[in-house]
Image (cartoon, helix red, strand yellow):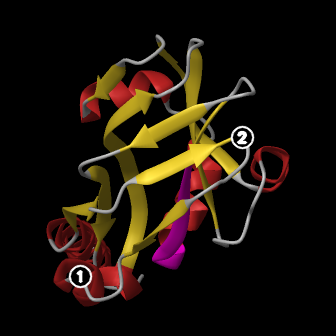
Amino acid sequence: MKATLQLRHIHICCCLFLCLAVVGCLLITKTFTIVFYIEDPIISTDVEIHSARVNLEGNDIWEDHKDDIKSIDGVEFAVKMTNRSNAEATGQVYVSDTGSLASHSAIQNNATLVLDGIDIPPHETEVIDRQRSLAYLRNFEEFKRHVETGSFYVYAIAENVPFHVEVSESLAVIVSFTAGPGD
């Protein structure tokens, strides 16, 4: 009887310890949000393509937690895209590990499409806020891989050719991630 009570106490203590350990792990993870602004415009035509680099290195939050990331929870954009051509454009945003893609087809074949379907009438501007960007978001799992590296290039083009699109003022990339000590 005494041995059964001792086993029961040991079992209860082990269960309490496991519960505290799980709760402790949950309490020490935290969600962070980084907003990265690309100040320089990205101007692209079917003849000349430009990109901008997103480099999270040097961001205090990223530097403090990049080695402890548990998950990339969300990526959003805030973008102002202008169609400078005489035809309607369907704006697209791609990301890549390289900034050397120099043609429309090279981007479509070698980069990851992350925003698609942004209809922009001729000589007009479409403003996409971070909430609205979710409707255009594509290939999130592949995009997370680029974000996890801490550095990637952004391309803005149009689906249709010829095109002349411009992303001006600030393009913001908003990254939310959960981080905590290792398992």
Characterize the local packing of mark 2: few (<14), some (14-19) or many (20 or more) Cα atoms within 10 angstroms: some
Q: Viewer-nearest of labels 2 and 1?
A: 2
- What is the x, y in percent for residue 5? 23, 73
| Any part of residue 71 in sight | yes
Q: Nearer the viewer, residue 148 or 20?
A: 148
Residue lying at 23% horizontally and 88% vertically, measured from the top left: 64
Q: Where does residue 157 sit, x and y in percent of width and height?
A: 61, 39
Q: Mark 1 falls on what kind of element?
A: loop
Task: Check the image and report above or below for 4 versus 89.
Answer: below
Three-letter code for the amino acid on which mark 2 is drawn: Asp
**Label located before the other in sequence (2 or 1):** 2
Q: Which residues are magenta?
A: 149-155
At 43% from the left edge and 21% from the top edge, which residue is drawn? 135
Magenta region, mostly helix, strand or loop? strand
Q: Nearer the viewer, residue 6 or 20?
A: 20
Q: Quadrant of residue 29?
A: bottom left
User: Would residue 115 be seen by someone viewing this image from the given angle?
Assistant: no
For residue 180, side relative to residue 53 (left or right)? left
Residue visible at 56% across and 44% down?
140
Report the residue marked by disc 2.
Answer: 46
Position of residue 89 relative to residue 80, above or below, is: above
- Is residue 88 magenta-colored? no
Can you give x and y, in whole percent of width and height, for residue 59 in the image? 23, 82
Left of 78 or right of it: where is 85? right
Relative image position of residue 6 (x, y in whole percent): 24, 81
Circle 1 residue: 59
Q: Give the spatial CA distance, label 2 vs label 1.
A: 34 Å
Q: Is residue 34 above or below residue 28?
A: above
Q: Residue at x 28, y 26 (%)?
A: 127
Most foreground residue, 69 or 106: 106
